[in-house]
Amino acid sequence: MSDRQVAREPRDDALAALLGPWLPHRRWFPAKGTSARVSAVGGTTLVDPHGEAEVRVLLLRVESGSGESVLQVPLTLRPGAVPGAVPDVAPPGGTDPDPGVAGSASGTGAPASSTGAPASAPPDSPAPRGSLADPAALVGTLPDGTLVRDGAGDPAFLRAWLACAEVDPGSPVRPEDLGDPRVISGEQSNTSVILPGAGPDGRTAMLKVFRGLSAGENPDVDVPRALARVGWEHVPRPLAWMSARWPDGQGVVHGHLEVLSAFVPGAQDGFELACAMAGRGESFDELARELGEVIAQMHAALAEALPVTDEDIADGPGPDGGRAGGPAPAGSEAAGAEVAGSEGAEPQGAGTDAAEQAGCPAAHALADALIARFAWASGIVPELRDHHGRVHALAERVRLLTGLPARQRVHGDLHLGQVLRGDGTWYVLDFEGEPLRPVAERTRPDQPLRDAAGMLRSFDYAAAVGKAPDAWTRVARDAFWSGYTAAAPALDPGLASVLLRTLELDKALYEAVYEARNRPDWLVIPLHGVERLLD
């Protein structure tokens, strides 16, 4: 990895101070509603080949009661007309627009991390997202009159980035051939920009700017690259990327800043597509079956591209491979939000001393984790308490299993909003996982069926948004599972059935707590799922 060096410049503190009141209005700011301290870590300067603006990629440290994080804000700086003034065309501090369309991240249920086909600007938006007249991108002016903008959609930053990014040798980018860049609205954790003409042979590409940075190689760069190397074609190919080194208080760390990937033209977000078909009463079964096949093939490709070592498994959270917490429910506009509060903290996966167990220690640990999850969830959601006996009965079935499938690298946050339908097939996106969790935690080996469970849970949310009957959901679920098992013939049917039900129930219990705390009107969705899984 060829890293950019992050260093402090005299103007960085002034830029951080200018960003202070602007940041809380960004969807990706991690400390909303808290008193946060923002300071400059440093930055790296890029050169715009056209010389239209200074380009400074600034890294910020955000400290609040909820913890500490490092953010990235690429900035463009241009001379202003009057020192200390802001041009009338674009007042600073504008809030990121909320698209407010069915299936968007505005509350109708689509996952906020979806990066499907580009959404057009809202009808009342004065300018396209990311354009030089977009008020949401204007940060303000420095005392010397320098106009400061968020550079994510600014052609000056984009040209500068393309000119110095690390490029895949087989996929040259075209820094001088930018069309009209467009920022995708509605993303929660990052900023993605459509770049017409930037890809090989003048094709469109998509740049993802990672707003929250983590030490280590971002899986949203490394995993698609690894899958592309083994010839798996259902992931948009990474074309270029940029990484940096920065101080973290205990030394110097490195991580990815951005990635440029191939764009799938005319593609539809999987969640929005499923919601629309559910709303029209159209069967989703054929698409679901194909999706199941693609996900099973993804797991096979991941096992080949990123083989797991004994050391990887030893570093895992427990013999069941479970991850504490996990992403917010499919359909949540707060993907990755922390469910556990100060009371009734989320279970970390109860374990049982393997030496005292008969049978499979991993199965015992998984059973214990399910019981702990239920105890936690039912303490917060009273409607779950009547299921005590059936949950414990399922846990006992798990405890009797003589073995579990091998853990491996997985997607880790899979649902319908993480797939695109385009070119007559499915593409899988967003291998990043929850950005606020350490990279090492997000890349731990896990049960592949945890991905399948997450996908199946999102079918319930799509059906709810589309107001489809239970039969629609049942047929779609059966079709997905049929496709998955057909493409994974080594999977033992009896074992897989019990394991999938357990992992899906674990996810539904998590969702119930999330909805009870954040969207009570949606609580019926996971409650219905729990009832079905235990029936």
Image (cartoon, rainbow, N blue to C red):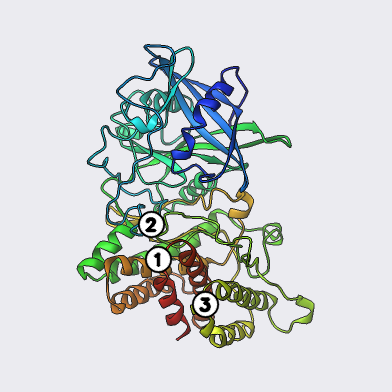
Cα separation, mark 2 vs mark 1, equals 8 Å
Numbered label attached to residue 220: none
Q: Nearer the viewer, mark 3 or mark 2?
A: 3
Find residue 137 and report its horizontal and vertical position in percent: 39, 31
Mark 3: few/some/many CA within 10 Å (<14, 14-19, 20+)? few
Q: Are marks 2 and 1 in contact (CB under 8 Å)?
A: yes
Which residue does the numbered mark 3 point to in the structure image? 382
Mark 1: few/some/many CA within 10 Å (<14, 14-19, 20+)? many
Q: Tell me the element at label 3.
A: helix
The answer to whether residue 1 is visible is no
Image quarter of residue 82 = top left
Which residue does the numbered mark 2 point to in the structure image? 417
Q: Nearer the viewer, mark 3 or mark 1?
A: 3
Which residue does the numbered mark 1 point to in the structure image? 458
Mark 2: few/some/many CA within 10 Å (<14, 14-19, 20+)? many
| Residue kind at label 2, given as amino acid type | Gly
